[in-house]
Amino acid sequence: MGHDDAVQANITKGVDVNRKLSQRTALVTGAGQGIGREIALKLASEGANLLANDLDESNLNATVALINEAGGNAAAVLGDVTADGMAETLVDAALSNFAGLHIIVNNAGYIWNSAIHNHSDEQWDAMLDIHAKAPFRILRAAGRYFRDQVPAERARGENLCRKVVNISSVSGVLGAATQASYAAGKMAIVGLTNALAQEWGRWNITVNAVAFGPIDTRLIQEYEDTPKRIEIKGRQHRVA
């Protein structure tokens, strides 16, 4: 059985209300491939409605198709999480497609490395924008919804537990040579996580960060001549 077949089997297995995340909606950014896709597929396999976001339309559509063709329920929002208004677009899409929002995974990101003496202001801003500012904006937009929704749920006798997972990195915790701006952004998300864990605990929302080490994705894959690249805002970035 291939990977995609196994994924579909897991999503289809036990399609009933007894799955752990049945009637819950999850937002995953950077869901087109790699860690983000695996997170999206796992959440869908547990019964969650999935709102997937990515910059790459073909990869994003492939993730959504994998879920829907297996009997899950997924929708796509194409776009750059650092763009003005995207945070509100994502939250609105969750509400309009699935009438709720219960899980947020801030996963979208990329690397742009160089020695500190070559680090540009553009480079610094780009890394802080994607790894700290974009998650901040998404959580701020979600917080405006939670502020009204949680009291209304409690008035009905409901006390739902919601989850936020912010993707950090060992570079954010320990630092890494040539990754000054990336490490700063990944540490910033840890600080944001700690602050919201204290602020949102009263709403029964758990907020955690996961600081990954090397994971077998395109970021660490070997290459022969030139590394693979991705285009972000018209600029080509190495992914290895």
Image (cartoon, rainbow, N blue to C red):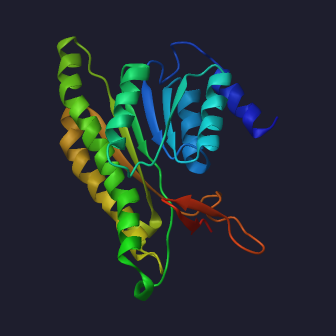
- Direction bottom: furthest residue: 117
Vertical side of 98 occupied by 76: above or below: below
Q: Position of residue 105 (x, y in %)?
A: 43, 42
Q: Residue at x 59, y 28 (%)?
A: 45
Position of the N terminus, as image quadrant, is: top right
Q: 116 and 167: which one is in front? A: 116
Work out whether residue 198 or residue 146 is closer to the camera in this orientation and state it: 146
Instruction: Pinpoint residue 237: horizontal percent, then vertical percent.
Output: 56, 67
What residue is at 40 percent from the left and 76 percent from the top? 180
- Quadrant in the rendering for residue 161: top left
Q: Measured from the top left, where is residue 138 in percent x and y?
A: 33, 43
Picture mark count = 0
175 with respect to 7 (left or right): left
Residue furthest front in the image: 234
- Quarter of the image where the C terminus is located: bottom right
- For residue 70, above or below residue 81: above
Please state which of residues 111 and 42 is positioned toward the viewer in this rendering: 111
Q: As rendered, which of 132 and 202 lies closer to the eye?
A: 132
Residue 52 higher or lower than 237, as above or below = above
Compared across the picture, whether 88 is left or right of 228 comes to left
Is residue 135 placed above or below 145 in the rendered structure? Answer: below
Q: Is residue 126 left or right of residue 205?
A: right
Provide residue 168's location: percent of width, then percent of height: 42, 58
